Image (tube, helix red, strand yellow):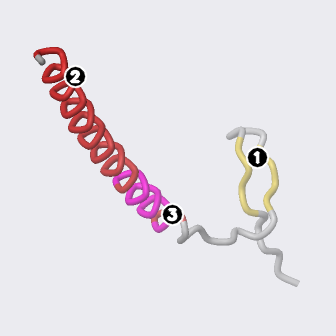
Amino acid sequence: MPPVMFLALLGAAGIAGYKIVSNLLEGSKVAGRKRANEMRRATSSARDLGKLEWDEDAGVYRPTPKREH
């Protein structure tokens, strides 16, 4: 009888451990989605700079200056 009780206790501990790990992973997914949404909102305000040209001195692309006609 003790082996049966041990196996029942082991099964109950396994189920409890599974539920705890499952809840932790679900919370992690929710937090990841929340961070992804925050990043999406933060980057959605990018503006269109028009055509870019390479600035040799600075080593970056800059918007082309608007030429008046």
State which mark lies toward you, 1 or 2: 2
**Nearest to N terminus: mark 2 or mark 3:** 2
Foreground of the two, 14 or 28: 14
In the rendered structure, find residue 40 and report the number of the disc placed on it. Answer: 3
Please say whether residue 15 is one of the residues in the magenta stretch.
no
Give, as a three-letter code, the residue at label 1: Asp
Foreground of the two, 15 or 65: 15
In the rendered structure, find residue 7 and report the number of the disc placed on it. Answer: 2
Assign the magenta stretch its main secondary structure.
helix
Foreground of the two, 20 or 10: 10
Kindly give the residue lying farthest to the right in the view shown: 69
The magenta-colored residue range is 31-41
Residue density around tag 3, few if under 14, some if 14–19, many if 20 or more, within 10 Å? few
Give, as a three-letter code, the residue at label 3: Arg
Disc 2 to disc 3, how far (Cα)? Answer: 49 Å
Asked if marks 1 and 3 touch (Cβ < 8 Å), the reply is no
Give, as a three-letter code, the residue at label 2: Leu
In the rendered structure, find residue 55 and report the number of the disc placed on it. Answer: 1
The residue positioned 53% from the left and 63% from the top of the image is: 43
